Image (spheres, rainbow, N blue to C red):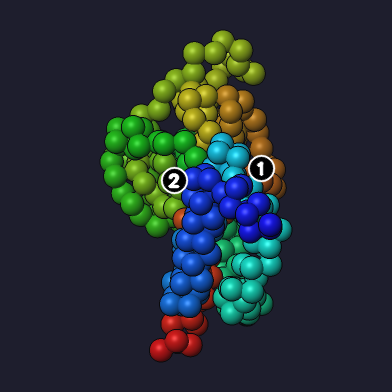
Amino acid sequence: MEIEWILEKINLVSVIDILLVTCLLYLASHLLRRSHAAALVRGMILALSTLLILLFVVANLFVLPALSWLSNSLLAVVGVAIIIVFQPEIRRALEVLGSSKLVAQRRNLEMDQRRTLNALCSAAFALADKRHGALIVIQRNSNLEPYIQTGIPLDGELSAEMIQTIFFPSTDLHDGAVIIDSAKRIAAAATVLPLTASRNLPDRRLGTRHRAALGISEVSDCLCIVVSEETGSVGLTQAGQIELRLSTHQLREQLQVAIPETPAQTRNVFHWLLGGVWRKESQGTA
């Protein structure tokens, strides 16, 4: 009687439902038997997410009880399954995270940041003491390539001495702005910046250099250090606002808050971390 009842309930949709679940279970088992976990890491997260979405859509669209049960069950066990399948990789990643190399890498990034701040502050106030005007643009996220192309490309290492040399009055590069790119290198000198059109200036006596510093901060998210040759004061523009007559401490403090670690530096940490995990995996399977 039970067999007859089951046979009466079976239809084409039920057969397709059972076949789909069977194929999915077989494919999952086949992958786990034949593949190394390291080879699956890059695609497993995407594959699991896609599988869950497809299961939910198909099960709800065609009212497939078995597939619906599988999708609900998969949600409950997927977290545990990932931990079990990738236990070696998780353990190796934790080893890398706890290693002294990552601490040293972080320390190097902090030292690079400190050198950048030292170079910018030292150059700005050395130029201010000599009454040499300067514009130093510091790129963050906005694209400054159109303005870099208006000047002379340098791609030089950032240092206080280099900036002071560029803005020495008798050099050909002193007229215009220096642009520091996101890699904290001197991308170009003698660049042309847009002037602000705002009439709400804190001081009507501000000249073209200060108006250019405000202008570039209005069209991008960059910072711009401006040194006045008339007063020997140092200012900073950001988001269309200008602060004048900053001290060394004030300038450094604002730069430290506004200039995070560069994207390139941050990516290097993750590349090194992932590289360490994959290298350990390859050594273990070699």
Q: Residue at x 53, y 45 (%)?
A: 11
- Residues packed near mark 2 inside 10 Å, few (<14), some (14 to 19) or many (20 plus): many
Q: Residue at x 51, y 36 (%)?
A: 222
Q: Amino acid at mark 1?
A: Gln
Q: Secondary structure at mark 2?
A: strand
- Residues packed near mark 1 inside 10 Å, few (<14), some (14 to 19) or many (20 plus): few
Residue behind mark 1: 254
Give me the disc on residue 16: none
Asked if disc 1 and disc 2 are in contact, CB closer than 8 Å, the reply is: no
Q: Amino acid at mark 2?
A: Ile
On the question of residue 129 being in view, the answer is: no
Q: Nearer the viewer, residue 155 or 133?
A: 155
Q: Secondary structure at mark 1?
A: helix
Q: Nearer the viewer, residue 283 or 59?
A: 59
Judge from the rendering whether residue 211 lies leftward or rightward of residue 175; answer left or right.
Answer: right
- Which quarter of the rendering shows the N terminus? bottom right
* Quarter where residue 193 is shown: top left
Residue behind mark 2: 180
User: Could you say where residue 175 lies in the image, as x and y percent from the top left?
Assistant: 36, 34
Q: Compared to 106, does 252 lie above or below?
A: above
* Quarter where residue 115 is shown: bottom right
Q: Compared to 4, does 107 lie above or below?
A: below
User: Could you say where residue 108 lies in the image, as x and y percent from the top left?
Assistant: 56, 68
Work out whether mark 1 precedes mark 2 in sequence or the reverse, and give the earlier one: 2
Q: Residue at x 44, y 82 (%)?
A: 282
Judge from the rendering whether residue 70 lies leftward or rightward of residue 172; answer left or right.
Answer: right
Q: How far apart in space, not on screen, are marks 1 and 2 (Cα)?
A: 17 Å
User: Could you say where residue 127 lies in the image, as x and y percent from the top left?
Assistant: 50, 44
User: Could you say where residue 7 lies in the image, as x and y percent from the top left?
Assistant: 58, 52
Q: Compared to 64, does 217 lie above or below?
A: above
